[in-house]
Every structure is written in structure tokens, then in C-alpha cells.
Image (spheres, helix red, strand yellow):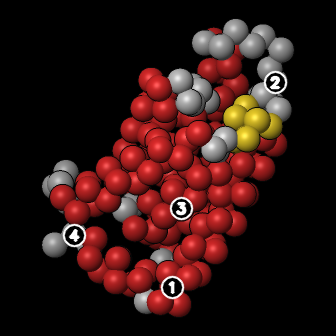
Amino acid sequence: MKVNVKKLAAAGMMTALGVCLSAFSIPVGASRCFPIQHLLNVLAGIFLGPGYGVGFAFSTALIRNLMGTGSLLAFPGSMVGAFLGALLYRQTGKMWTAFAGEILGTGILGGMLCYPLAVLFLGNKEAAIFTYVLPFLISTAGGCILAAILLGALYKSGMVRYLQGMLKEV
């Protein structure tokens, strides 16, 4: 894979932003909801693509876990959402598909993938396969609303096309 230095730098800045804002989490049920991660996942899907988006999501989850501001559940939720949102956006070029991919990937698939982690590593023997789906859907919906507001402003100002052109692989 050819490394795009601009995308790598943008992913690093998004990781730093995600880590710095990780103090703003909301406990919902058995998980800590972090809407800023979902906002950043949508942005990564639109501006960075699947590879860099997953790398950014993994890096953010890893650093948050090492700092004690995240949980193991952040890995499947954020990574699947970032990948699916970026993949759908790449296929269609429509922003709403990045939102749909984030909601489906994080809220449903990521929530279901948390079940084995909760049972094997967190000792939550009472967890069911859909235990984390509702909290993750709530969190990702909040993040997608924030992303829609931000992207609406960026789109009206012409910054979306500018950033996409700037980050395009040469």
C-alpha cells in the first residue's frame, strides 16, 4: 500500500482529537458512549477512506484503553463503523451512506461483536448478543447528528470538496 502522507497526518490529528475529547463520554447501560468517536468515524469515512479510517479508529481505541478512558468494547464498535462507513461512501459518493455505514457498523454489527469480548475478557457472563446494540445505537446516532451538523456547515462553505481534493491520492 502506498502511503499518503496527507491522509496519515489527518488520521493522526483525528486520533489526537479523539483521545483528547475522550473525557466526554456518557454511560448508557453496560457501555460508555462516546459520540465524538462516531463523528470522527464519519469524517474519516468521507475524507480518509477505509484503510486510514480503520487505522485511525484502532489507534484512538488503543490509546484510550492505555490511558484508562476507554474500554475493550471500543475496538469492534469503532473499527467496524469506520470501515463500513468509508466503504459505502467510497462505493456511492453520497454522504448519507457514510452515516448509514457508521450506524450499521457501530450500532448493530459492532454492538454484536462486543458480546464475545464481554464474555471472554470482561467476565460479563450475563451478556446477551444484543446487550450492547441499543447503547451503541444511541451513541452512534448522537455522533452522526453532530457529524451532519458539522458536514452541513463544511459543505456550504465549500470545505468538503477542498479537503477531499487536498487529501486525494496522487
Report the mark closest to the observer, 3 or 1.
1
Choose the circle earlier in sequence order: 2 or 1: 2
Choose the circle earlier in sequence order: 3 or 1: 3
The image quadrant that residue 121 belongs to is top right
In the displayed structure, 46 sits above or below 130; it is: below
* Residue at which label 1 appears: 155
Q: Please state if 116 lies on the left or on the right of 135 as rendered.
A: left
* Residue at which label 2 appears: 128
Report the mark closest to the observer, 4 or 1.
1
Q: Residue 79 versus residue 158: which sits nearer the camera?
A: 158
Mark-to-mark CA distance, 4 and 2: 43 Å
Identify the element where label 1 is drawn: helix
Q: Quadrant of the C terminus?
A: bottom left
Mark-to-mark CA distance, 4 and 1: 21 Å
Report the mark closest to the observer, 2 or 1.
1
Report the mark closest to the observer, 3 or 2.
3
* Residue at which label 3 appears: 42
| Point 51% across, 57% down: residue | 40
Query: Residue 86 location in percent, x, y?
Result: 47, 61
Mark-to-mark CA distance, 2 and 1: 41 Å
Q: Amino acid at mark 1?
A: Tyr
Res. 169 mark:
4
Asked whether residue 166 is in view, the answer is yes
